[in-house]
Image (cartoon, coloured by chain):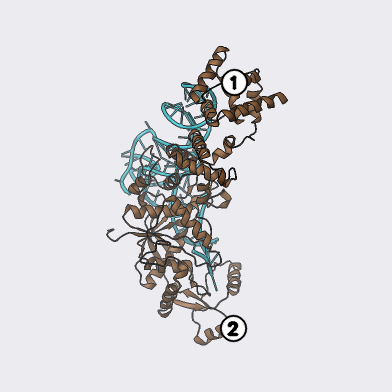
Chain colours: A brown, B cyan
RNA sequence: GCCCCCAUCGUCUAGCCAGGUUAGGACAUCGCCCUUUCAAGGCGACGGCAGCGGUUCAAAUCCGCUUGGGGGCGCCA
């Protein structure tokens, strides 16, 4: 049945960032293509001149590459069915529009937006539902000329036939629309640009797309497109409408829900393989119990549109965080180090010239210490800025419950001397010294450990103290303990 | 308002198509263990078939209605 080479496409319009919903649609297309040894095509739908930007094209390409969703045909790589920017295919849309006009499937309409708006409002005021009233369906050549001489520029409308239109959705089965619902929609705007439904059909047909996999917000566009395929004499591809991703409040994911863009997550230090894994598992499951972690290869191997759910999914940051932390723990420390350094630079914590080999080494140690307790790399800056500044605050809670305990100044003073006299400053040596000292005084080691942690980090929680001291280094540790002693004296 | 789609724990989902399970897993939450804190890990708890009617010996599963949610109704895509 699937002897024909599978050809699928992701067709974003470059009007902003790549959102998680779009990324997921791209992912499903990509996985489907890879699974079936097919071709994954990227097409840029930039027919809306006012909203499309080149910058946005760049961000989308960058986001897809970051996710590892490389396309086989499209921008930068070309291909036999290009160009892959709709703005460069205008002649094709005009050609096929002309064809529809000459075969009677399309007609010029000179109604202005203002006129349409007035008639629409009047109709609705009467309690009837509006669809284009076909005022221009039977215009004579004289009438058309008169309109043109008035300076009007026509749009081209598709003449929707009587009856119903049915298509098969791969997830839902047959879906039927009454053509009454589909008024004579515009296929060419007055500026000569094609509308979405028209350009989409011409391109999908010309690019030999076999499966149209897109968000289910397009279901209601599909009957119009099916009508166009028929009128144009093109074979219909198969359609699969995948569910949308919603925010916590169950409305379409948007800026209101924080940042739904792929680049935001990249910049926060999420790993692309975690993002792909999470996105894949939204609306899709393999039925394997207890298995949540899937490599790209495992996703491809298992991917099937039949297992995609039909209902919208709520984006759950908690689960993404968990999944990312799983990948973080398994990732190459040097790679995480680079992500950390990037974040530090972007936040102005360090400058390029401060990025010495020694500093990189230090960052690697920080990552090794922190990666088991963070969910995304930028969290280090949020929860453990003390690694990179001497101006950390003491958590008031920590001051109250730890530093103000009896005997803390003495403990810190003793620790200071003890640490200062250590030859080696590795975790094992430090630990032995502290435990011995505590033992000598008949105290639990915890009575040293907790005040010291607050002293050097300002916090009650954090990595194991001895490792922390080692990474911070003797000089920094002594200065911080001394500073804490001063701080306590002043209180 | 009209049209289309959808409906299992708080969330993501398995099970449904080919009716018979203590309705399973994951995240989150809570508890215990481990432990210098946190995290991780181990063990456990909490928690669901939207409702109502059918069909049937038997319904999460099939059918209908209701309710709820989402989407669309542009010279946006």
Label 1 marks a residue whose chain is A
Near-viewer residue (A164 or B27) = B27
Q: Is residue A384 above or below residue A286?
A: above
Q: Is residue A358 above or below residue A208?
A: above
Separation of marks 1 and 2 at Cα, in angstroms:
91 Å
Near-viewer residue (A480 or A15) = A480
Instruction: Estimate how packed mark 1 is, as few (under 14), some (14 to 19) or many (20 or more) residues with alpha carbons within 10 Å.
Output: many
Instruction: Estimate how packed mark 2 is, as few (under 14), some (14 to 19) or many (20 or more) residues with alpha carbons within 10 Å.
Output: few
Query: In the image, is A6 to the left or to the right of A84?
Result: left
Q: Residue at x 37, y 68 (%)?
A: A206
Q: Is residue B67 above or below residue B32?
A: below
Give the foreground label among 1 and 2. 1
Rendering coords of residue A104 (x, y %): 42, 79
Quadrant of the image containing the N terminus of chain A: bottom left
Is residue A399 visible to us here? no
Marks 1 and 2 close (CB-CB < 8 Å): no
Quadrant of the image containing the C terminus of chain A: top right
The mark total stands at 2
Query: In the image, is A61 to the left or to the right of A391?
Result: left
| Residue at disc 2, secondary structure | loop
Label 2 marks a residue whose chain is A
Q: Which residue is mark 2?
A: A150
Rendering coords of residue A437 (x, y %): 56, 16
Q: Quadrant of residue B22?
A: top left
Q: Which residue is mark 1?
A: A415
| Residue at disc 1, secondary structure | helix
Is residue A434 visible to us here? yes
Query: In the image, is A46 to the left or to the right of B15?
Result: right
Rendering coords of residue A424 (x, y %): 51, 24
Q: Earlier in the sequence, mark 1 or mark 2?
A: 2
């Amino acid at each position: 049945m699937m002897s024909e080479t599978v050809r699928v496409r992701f067709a974003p319009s470059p009007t902003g960032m790549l959102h998680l919903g779009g990324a997921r649609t791209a992912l499903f297309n990509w996985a489907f293509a890879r699974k079936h040894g097919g071709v994954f095509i990227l097409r840029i739908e930039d027919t809306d001149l006012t909203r499309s930007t080149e910058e946005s094209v760049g961000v989308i390409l960058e986001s897809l590459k970051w996710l590892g969703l490389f396309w086989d045909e499209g921008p930068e790589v070309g291909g036999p069915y290009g160009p892959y920017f709709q703005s460069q295919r205008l002649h094709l849309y005009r050609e096929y529009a002309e064809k529809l006009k000459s075969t009677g499937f399309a007609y010029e309409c000179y109604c202005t937006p203002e006129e349409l708006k007035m008639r629409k409002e009047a109709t609705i005021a009467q309690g009837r539902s509006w669809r284009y009233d076909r005022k221009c369906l039977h215009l004579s050549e004289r009438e058309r000329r008169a309109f043109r001489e008035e300076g009007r520029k026509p749009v081209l409308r598709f003449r929707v036939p009587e009856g119903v239109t049915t298509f098969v959705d791969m997830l839902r089965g047959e879906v039927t629309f009454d053509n009454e619902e589909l008024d004579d929609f515009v296929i060419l705007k007055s500026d000569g640009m094609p509308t979405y439904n028209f350009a989409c059909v011409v391109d999908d047909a010309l690019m030999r797309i076999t499966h149209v996999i897109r968000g289910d917000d397009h279901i209601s566009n599909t009957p119009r497109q099916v009508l166009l395929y028929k009128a144009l004499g093109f074979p219909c591809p198969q359609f699969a409408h995948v569910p949308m991703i919603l925010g916590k409040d169950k409305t379409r994911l948007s800026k209101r829900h924080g940042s739904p863009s792929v680049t935001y997550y990249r910049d926060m230090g999420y790993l692309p393989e975690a993002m792909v894994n999470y996105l894949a598992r939204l609306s899709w499951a393999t039925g394997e119990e207890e298995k949540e972690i899937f490599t790209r290869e495992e996703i491809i191997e298992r991917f099937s549109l039949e297992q995609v759910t039909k209902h919208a999914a709520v984006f759950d940051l908690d689960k993404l965080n968990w999944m990312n932390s799983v990948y973080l723990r398994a990732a190459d420390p040097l790679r995480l180090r680079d992500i950390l350094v990037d974040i530090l630079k972007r936040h102005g914590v360090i400058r390029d010239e401060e990025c010495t080999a020694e500093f990189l080494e230090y960052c690697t140690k920080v990552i090794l210490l922190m990666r088991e307790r963070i969910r995304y790399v930028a969290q280090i800056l949020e929860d453990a800025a003390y690694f990179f500044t001497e101006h950390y605050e003491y958590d008031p809670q920590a001051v109250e419950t730890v530093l103000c305990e009896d005997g803390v100044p003495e403990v810190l003073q003793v620790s200071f001397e003890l640490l200062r006299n250590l030859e080696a400053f590795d975790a094992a040596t430090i630990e032995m010294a502290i435990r011995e000292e505590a033992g000598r005084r008949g105290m639990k080691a915890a009575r040293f450990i907790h005040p010291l942690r607050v002293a050097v980090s300002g916090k009650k929680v954090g990595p194991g103290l001895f490792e922390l001291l080692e990474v911070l280094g003797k000089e920094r540790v002594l200065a911080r303990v001394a500073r804490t002693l001063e701080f306590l004296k002043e209180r």
